Amino acid sequence: MSIVVSGIRPTGNLHLGNYFGAIKSFVRMQQEDQCFFFIADYHSLTTHPTPGDLHGNVKNVLVEFLASGLDPEKATLYIQSDVPEVAELYLMLNMNAYIGELERCTSFKEKIRTQPQNINAGLLTYPTLMASDIIIHKAHKVPVGKDQEQHLEMTRTFANRFNRLYNIDYFPEPVAYSFEQNLVKIPGLDGSLKMSKSDNENSAIFLADTAEVIRKKVMRAVTDTGPAEINQPKTQAIENLFSLMNVLSSTETYDHFNELYNTCQIRYGDMKKQLSEDVVRFVEPFSEKIKELHSNGDYLRKVIEMGAEKARISARKTISEVREIIGFKSF
Ligand code: TYM
């Protein structure tokens, strides 16, 4: 049995990218592996949320985890900040992480480009906090989307470095994992390569969206003027619509519109109408459960208390062993 760890930042509602990149694998892995799934609220502090927003978003993610089929009896579901051992391991890992390698991280360079006014130390050391999340439970597999691949590579570097430094085979080497053949990247409706909550609200479809909102978003999705010749390569925006259709519609539907595209007969309006109905059909069961769970405060509290307790047992064990290895020994 493998140990599985993964987390999601509470920065808003969960979208189809989160679902197909990560949660779909969580739901399957909880059946056979020892799983720890958490809400990464320490990580979200890099964006300086208000206390009210932070709390609301943590609740949203918890509710959406449960609505997606995560089972608190099977997997350990917890809030990262309920396990302060994570912060202790993060401090220790930071001592052996080099500024140069942290600065070279793609997601950090991206932040420098997109938000130069808020480049804080938390962003620089984001990979060591993430490594701590993972190795605190001595994980083997980390179900994530394609965008997290480099962070996993850095996690392996930090885990191996610890083992080498203390000459002990203590932390396993965790790998980025997906139940699909490859790591997944769901594109945005606005022509962007990755569906994301932060860039543009209209680029993402959320699990909590109503049918009406979904139809509006899909019908507004970016397209182009249409193919001018047979088998013309698709522009990014059109490629995105087909990628979404590939995961949400039937193979016949995908093939039908692909054929229309390749023979220059496609009408994007028809394609979007079909796609929006397929998205609505997919999202509706989630949004209904989300509504139900939001009003069930007692149950949510119970889930979180149980998760915190289970996660801390595992984390405490690792921290006490790590302290011993490092030389923090009792007299
Ligand atoms: P976050 O919160 O940005 O995203 C959560 C998960 O959703 C995946 N994802 C996507 N997958 C496919 N297509 C998309 N458009 C898309 N958008 C998001 C992400 O790959 C991720 O799996 N650093 C992490 C949170 C984290 C974590 C961890 C993950 C903190 N500690 C330890 C794993 C293990 C993050 O920001 O994900």
Image (cartoon, helix red, strand yellow):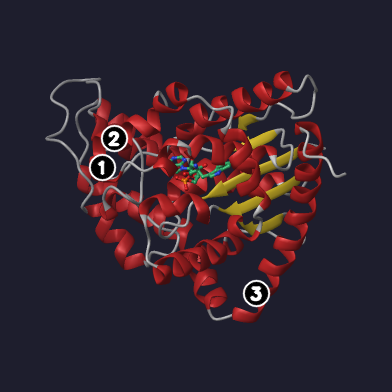
Q: Nearer the N terminus, badge 3 or badge 1?
A: 1
Q: How far apart, in angstroms, are the residues tagged by discs 3 and 1?
A: 35 Å
- Residue type at mark 2 is Ile
Q: Are marks 3 and 2 in contact (CB under 8 Å)?
A: no
Q: Which residue is mark 3?
A: 301
Q: How far apart, in angstroms, are the residues tagged by discs 1 and 2?
A: 6 Å
Using residue 31 as the reference point, say whether residue 202 is left or right of it.
left
Q: Residue 210 appears in which quarter of the rendering? A: bottom left
Q: Secondary structure at mark 2?
A: helix
Percent across and percent down for residue 45 are 43, 54
- Residue type at mark 1 is Gln
Q: Residues within 10 Å of mark 1 (few under 14, many from 20)?
A: few
Q: How far apart, in angstroms, are the residues tagged by discs 3 and 2?
A: 38 Å
- Residue type at mark 3 is Arg
Task: Give the residue at x 55% y 41%.
Answer: 129
Q: Are marks 1 and 2 in contact (CB under 8 Å)?
A: yes
Q: Which residue is mark 1?
A: 115
Task: Give the residue at x 56% y 63%.
Answer: 62
Percent across and percent down for residue 254 are 39, 37
Foreground tag (3 vs 1): 1
| Marking on residue 112 | 2
Percent across and percent down for residue 288 are 50, 71
Q: Is residue 74 visible?
A: no
